[in-house]
Image (cartoon, rainbow, N blue to C red):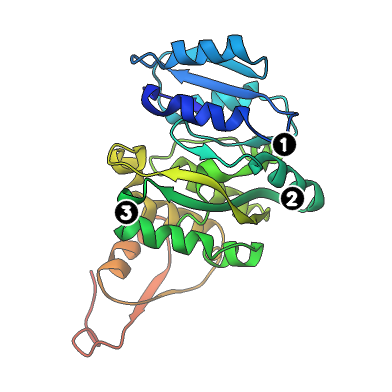
Amino acid sequence: MPCYNAAATLNEALESLAGQTFAGFEVIAVDDGSTDGTAEILQVWVGRDERFHLIRTEHKGIIEALNTGLAACRGKYIARMDADDIAYPERLEKQVDFLESREDVTVAGCLVEGFPRDQVRGGFRVYISWLNSLVSDSDLRREMFVESPLAHPSVMFRTEDVIGAGGYQDHGWPEDYDLWLRLYIAGKKFGKVNQVLLSWREYPERLTRTDSRYSLENFLRAKAHYLMMGPLRNRDAVIIWGGGMAGRRLSKHLLREGAPLRAFVDIDPRKIGNTRR
């Protein structure tokens, strides 16, 4: 659990972990150079519950914090958790049971609910609805290049597989989506417990709202990169269906990745016969 200036929400997150029905776990909390008392709150929990462990670092960002935590984990499985979310009491138990019964699956997510309710609106509401409609490996693989089909703090994964894939990497785009795409290319399987097990907090200061790595342009960069490593690898021609703004923006990144782009397909008579540069 990476933590940065999370004092306002941290106790609620930690209480949800302390109340898990599954007992055999430890919490690795990485304080990423917080200045608001986050480390002090974590230290209280370390003294209160022997399952809680604190690592303090200088402020280096989310990816460094994630990899620091990853290196310290000793378990067969790792569950991601953020310092502003709330895990349902049975979350860890349900996800461990899922992975124990599905040895072919590397990443096990779950359904999520957004909160507080007055903040769950617009695109976030649509995104959660879409996320929760994707449960099976075939669902998740089919939609992998639409958007990130797993909420990062909702997942549990096999430690060995994620370390074998190189852990978290910084390419200037979302670190969680990058990991899912690398595992996808490697042929690893995904799944979800078909039950809401995480309350996912929405607020204007959330990292995905404020960090440029999570911009639409950087999502497109990630998609183009891994499309060329996977589905479009060794293709003689690439044709984009849709000559509008989204298709044009994606084409720019595909060309930078070396895609043999040949044409756009569109039904808009104003676009038919035109040339894109």
Q: In which quarter of the image is residue 158?
A: top right
Q: Which of 262 and 141 is in front in this view?
A: 141
Quadrant of the frame with the C terminus: bottom left
Residue count near mark 1 (Cα–Cα under 10 Å), binned few <14, some 14–19, many ≥20: some
Query: Label 2 sits on what residue type?
Result: Phe
Q: Quadrant of residue 267?
A: bottom left
Q: Nearer the viewer, residue 266 or 174?
A: 174
Q: How far apart are marks 3 and 2 (CA)?
A: 33 Å
For the point 58% across and 62% down, the residue is 140
Q: Give how far across and how far down residue 34 sits, in percent.
A: 38, 17
Counting residues from the start of the chain, the first of labels 3 and 2 encountered is 2
Q: Quadrant of residue 273?
A: bottom left
> Would you say the residues marked 3 and 2 are in contact, meaning their CB atoms lie under 8 Å apart?
no
Q: Residue 160 carries which label?
A: 1
Q: In this view, does 156 lie above or below 13?
A: below
> Helix, strand or loop at disc 1?
helix
Query: Label 1 sits on what residue type?
Result: Glu
Q: Distance between the residues labelled 2 and 1?
A: 17 Å
Residue count near mark 2 (Cα–Cα under 10 Å), binned few <14, some 14–19, many ≥20: some
Q: Residue 62 carries which label?
A: none
> Helix, strand or loop at disc 2?
helix
| Residue ID for mark 2 | 98
Q: Give how far across and how far down residue 120 sits, in percent.
A: 34, 53
For the point 30% across and 67% down, the residue is 246
Query: Label 3 sits on what residue type?
Result: Leu
Q: Give how far across and how far down residue 4 sits, in percent.
A: 40, 23
| Residue ID for mark 3 | 216
